[in-house]
């Protein structure tokens, strides 16, 4: 009997520790996105990490008496997906109190304003939530006459860098034909010389009310909790929050401490650069924040400035003029206008040098081609002082690239944060502005990837809760479909030679996004030792008909080794 106990003890010691697995997912198509892009059948999870990947036989052999075993029934299993570019707090708060309509036309906007007027006390402001003019059926910016659908309330239209106002809003704000243009902005006039309601980079002239009921911390916490939960349901196990200040950081930290975060978050510090450069340098050097400070649940990623405006409102700083159609779409009066550069080159370099010296990864909001060129000039200047590739600094948005810009970025080891959804939604209007021939390098993903530049996929989601109708849609499969097909809302394929493969599109939401976030050793692929963030989907991403990719939905999401959403029936 004594020898029998010794023999049993030896057998127990001989069983590898990995046999005590917690979760097994088997009988599936496991798309690992490893270096070989290999396909496996099953995955074993221990704690919050992937323990092993292999055949059903290999993985099921690790089953213990308390192992949770899930039969995938042939479903496709992907790594947890990463949206590198969202605005979670704003998106979360946007529909906390009411569901927003889809503003796809001026008529829809007018209907919403009229309905709001019925429940808003007379004389109080009605503000149309942020809407992008290129996505309106009329392909023009709403003017004073459009917003005068209501005359009992001042009405303002939030078009991001350009705003609209009705007659009463102009009146209560004291805006007349005599009002001087603010620095870098314009009070657009009609043929009669009177303001037509379009305020280009001049929204500061509007005497908008101080919020009677400002967004409270509690509302931000509730909105953020809701939004992160929705991101997870969409298959996003990590998101990049692309513009935080001290207040926002506090909200993220408080939610984590009290309820936990619904997804992993990487924060980008957006600094206010509209100040004396000495003040900005002092803030950067005095901040305790740094790139990669934190952990895989919540950490800092990038230091960011806003270098130009937006293509959606004609303020992105372009290499070419916006031309005559810019008047219709953006309310521009000068056909030679090229947009705005918000930070002069010398100031930009000083700001970046301060952040670079503190070890920050660098980026800038840049949409126009000329703004991209300015950003690369700054990167090149820093690169001469110390190679910049190790920082994984990147172009953010980078709508209007060029062959030269791609080559310059590749030479320095610069990464690319791109939004494929703009190909789908914005090209029909932008083609009217610039002409098809000048859209050749609008999100040229094939050229960028072929140059050896990692592309991190992202949505720039900012408003709305629905993953496919929000501004901008955060459904990762919808965005991958746009990168693969390059189909516009009108069904036209914009420069098909810039299409990318399904495998490459998936990499933009997995390994390449993880690389940009310095997380390639822990996320982005299904490999032993990495975090157990996994997504099971309702059809085969690699083989389903191409137009079904945009319809893919997750059926189960595993985050940190636990099944957090859905299940297999």
Image (tube, grey):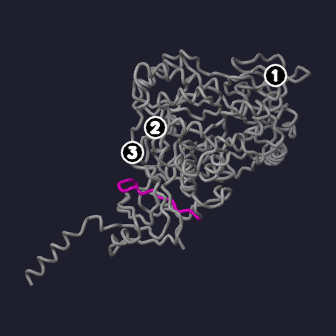
Residue 295: assigned label: 3
The residue where tag 2 is placed is 301
The residue where tag 1 is placed is 333
> Measured along the vertical axis of the image, is residue 25 above or below residue 79?
below
Mark 1–mark 3 CB contact (< 8 Å)? no
Local crowd size for mark 1, using a 10 Å CA cut-off: few (<14), some (14–19), many (≥20)? some
Residue 535 in percent (x, y) is at 51, 59
> Measured along the vertical axis of the image, is residue 55 above or below residue 182?
below
The residue lying at 56 percent from left, 65 percent from top is 555
The residue lying at 39 percent from left, 49 percent from top is 522
Mark 1–mark 2 CB contact (< 8 Å)? no
The residue lying at 25 percent from left, 66 percent from top is 16
531 drawn magenta: yes
SS for dot 3:
loop
| Residue range highlighted in magenta | 527-538
Instruction: Give the CA separation, mark 1 to mark 3.
Output: 49 Å
Instruction: Give the CA separation, mark 3 to mark 2.
Output: 11 Å
In the shown orientation, is residue 481 left or right of residue 241? right
Q: Earlier in the sequence, mark 1 or mark 2?
A: 2
Q: Using the rendered view, name the quadrant where residue 195 is placed.
A: top right
Assign the magenta stretch its main secondary structure. loop
In the shown orientation, is residue 279 left or right of residue 186? left
């Amino acid at each position: 009997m004594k020898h029998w106990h010794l023999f049993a003890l030896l057998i127990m010691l001989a069983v590898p520790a990995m046999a005590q697995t917690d979760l097994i997912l088997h009988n599936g198509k496991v798309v690992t996105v490893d270096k070989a892009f290999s396909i496996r059948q099953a995955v074993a999870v221990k704690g919050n990490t992937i323990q092993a990947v292999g055949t059903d036989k290999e993985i099921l052999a690790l089953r213990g008496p308390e192992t949770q075993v899930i039969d995938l029934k042939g479903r496709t299993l992907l790594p947890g997906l990463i949206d590198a570019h969202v605005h979670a707090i704003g998106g979360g708060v946007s529909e906390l109190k009411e569901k927003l309509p889809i503003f796809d036309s001026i008529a829809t906007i007018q209907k919403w304003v009229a309905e709001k007027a019925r429940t808003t006390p007379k004389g109080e402001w009605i503000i149309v939530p942020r809407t992008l003019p290129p996505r309106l059926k009329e392909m023009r910016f709403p003017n004073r006459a459009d917003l005068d659908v209501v005359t009992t309330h001042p009405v303002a239209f939030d078009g991001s860098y350009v705003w609209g106002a009705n007659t009463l809003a102009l009146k209560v704000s004291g805006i007349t034909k005599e009002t001087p243009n603010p620095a870098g902005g314009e009070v657009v006039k009609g043929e009669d010389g009177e303001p037509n309601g379009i305020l280009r980079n001049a929204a500061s002239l509007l005497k908008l009310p101080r919020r009677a009921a400002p967004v409270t911390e509690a509302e931000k916490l509730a909105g953020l909790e809701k939004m992160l939960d929705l991101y997870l349901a969409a298959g996003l196990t990590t998101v990049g929050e692309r513009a935080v200040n001290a207040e926002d950081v506090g909200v993220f930290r408080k939610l984590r401490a009290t309820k936990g975060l619904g997804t992993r978050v990487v924060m980008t510090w957006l600094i206010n650069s509209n100040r004396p450069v000495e003040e900005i340098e002092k803030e950067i050097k005095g901040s305790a924040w740094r790139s990669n400070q934190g952990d895989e649940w919540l950490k800092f990623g990038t230091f960011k400035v806003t270098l130009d405006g937006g293509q959606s409102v004609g303020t992105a700083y372009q290499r070419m003029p916006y031309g005559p159609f810019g008047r219709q779409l953006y309310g521009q009066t000068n056909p030679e206008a090229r947009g705005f550069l918000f930070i002069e080159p010398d100031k930009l370099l000083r700001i970046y040098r301060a952040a670079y010296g503190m070890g920050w990864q660098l980026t800038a909001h840049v949409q126009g081609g000329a703004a991209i060129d300015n950003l690369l000039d700054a990167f090149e200047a820093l690169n001469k002082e110390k190679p910049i590739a190790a920082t994984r600094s990147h172009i953010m948005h980078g709508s209007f690239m060029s062959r030269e810009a791609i080559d310059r970025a590749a030479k320095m080891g610069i990464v690319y944060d791109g939004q494929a959804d703009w190909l789908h939604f914005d090209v029909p209007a932008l083609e009217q502005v610039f002409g098809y021939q000048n859209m050749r390098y609008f999100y040229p993903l094939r050229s960028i990837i072929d140059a050896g530049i990692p592309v991190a996929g992202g949505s720039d989601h900012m408003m709305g809760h629905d993953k496919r109708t929000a501004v901008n849609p955060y459904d990762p499969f919808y965005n991958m479909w746009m990168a693969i097909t390059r189909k516009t809302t009108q069904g036209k394929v914009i420069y098909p030679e810039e299409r990318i493969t399904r495998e490459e599109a998936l990499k933009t939401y997995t390994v390449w996004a993880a690389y940009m976030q310095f997380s390639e050793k822990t996320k982005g692929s299904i490999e032993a030792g990495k975090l157990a963030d996994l997504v099971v989907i309702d059809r085969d991403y690699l083989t389903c008909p191409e137009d079904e990719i945009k319809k893919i939905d997750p059926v189960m999401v595993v985050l940190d080794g636990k099944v957090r959403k859905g299940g297999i029936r």
